[in-house]
Image (cartoon, helix red, strand yellow):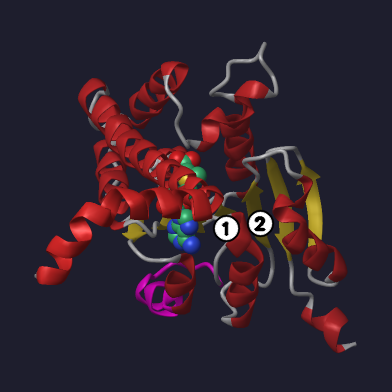
Amino acid sequence: MWLISLSLPLLPTIIIFVYFRYHVKVASLCRRALAWAQSLMRGRVCVKDVHAFVFTNCTHGKADSVLEMFHRYAETHHTLSVGQLTARDHPPKPAVMVSGDMLDEVIKRTHPLMVLELGTHCGYSTVRMLRLLPPGGRVITVETDSVTADLGEEIIMVAGFKHAQFQVLPCSSAEAISSLHSYLEADQSPSEGIDLVLMDHDPQQYLQDLLLLEREELLCPSGCTVLLIKRTRRDDECREILDYVRKEENCYSIRTEFPQMMEIVYRKDVQRREG
Ligand SMILES: C[S@@+](CC[C@H](N)C(=O)[O-])C[C@H]1O[C@@H](n2cnc3c(N)ncnc32)[C@H](O)[C@@H]1O
């Protein structure tokens, strides 16, 4: 106690000393703390605001109305929904349609029965895919943030989908993939594995998660589409996974490569590999 009262008058001197001695480090630390707090607030506010807007304004039970509300929200706010991605790339086109349309096209062409989505966020892309799946089709969607996972799940249900059609796993992609066999076994799907993977979580995890999916033999060997979402224009964003895919040409081919989305096809040609 006596030490505190003795050092109290010295406090301004200590602060001035620390400032002059470490001001560059302190300023950088403050800037980082501020940026972290801002991004945290933006992320939280964003998911809750999107959820509240969609929830209160959509017609419950109608997937198209849910998507429309996401689009309307995105006209005035920043969101993370995949449908908004090419807004800056193609100003003349309706911003919210471009990459969402690409996703629709892939689902309509490939008719996946079992879809794994990494990165649920508020459920936009899950709803977008679910409404186009063939009968019996199912989406397992993974979201690491448990609050976001709950909000996303609610939106998917508001869109009219039942738990027989989808499941939200509130954990990291790596944890989900490691436990996915039990979910697939419980599921009576006629599919031989996952038919489509949508990776829209963390590009740093893309390759690691693909390798884990391969190791766990979860990808349908007769053909699995892997969609990679690119959210920045940085060339190196997906470099690791693309280098790997190009190297493993026995199993992988790149079908389409757009600035914001890449479509990779996995096929394990057992005969060719054995031969
Ligand atoms: C870009 S948002 C997904 C947007 C969503 N696909 C859509 O179109 O509405 C990415 C989400 O992935 C989640 N995420 C990030 N890293 C993850 C990981 N390793 N495993 C699972 N989810 C992750 C984030 O919390 C965030 O909600």
Task: Tell me the element at label 2.
Answer: strand
Which residue type carries mark 2? Answer: Thr
Q: Label 2, on which residue?
A: 225
Whether the magenta-drawn stretch holds residue 131 is answered as no
Which residue type carries mark 1? Answer: Val
Q: Which residues are magenta?
A: 179-192
Q: Quadrant of residue 275?
A: bottom right
Task: Tell me the element at label 1.
Answer: strand
Q: Does the rendering let one see residue 117? A: yes
Q: Position of residue 171 (x, y in %)?
A: 37, 66
Q: Does the rendering let one see residue 163? A: no
Q: CA distance from mark 2 to mark 1?
A: 6 Å
Q: Label 1, on which residue?
A: 197
Q: Residue at x 51, y 55 (%)?
A: 21
Q: Seen from this angle, which residue lies furthest left?
A: 1
Q: Residue at x 54, y 28 (%)?
A: 84
How many badges with numbers are in the image? 2
Q: Are marks 2 and 1 in contact (CB under 8 Å)?
A: yes
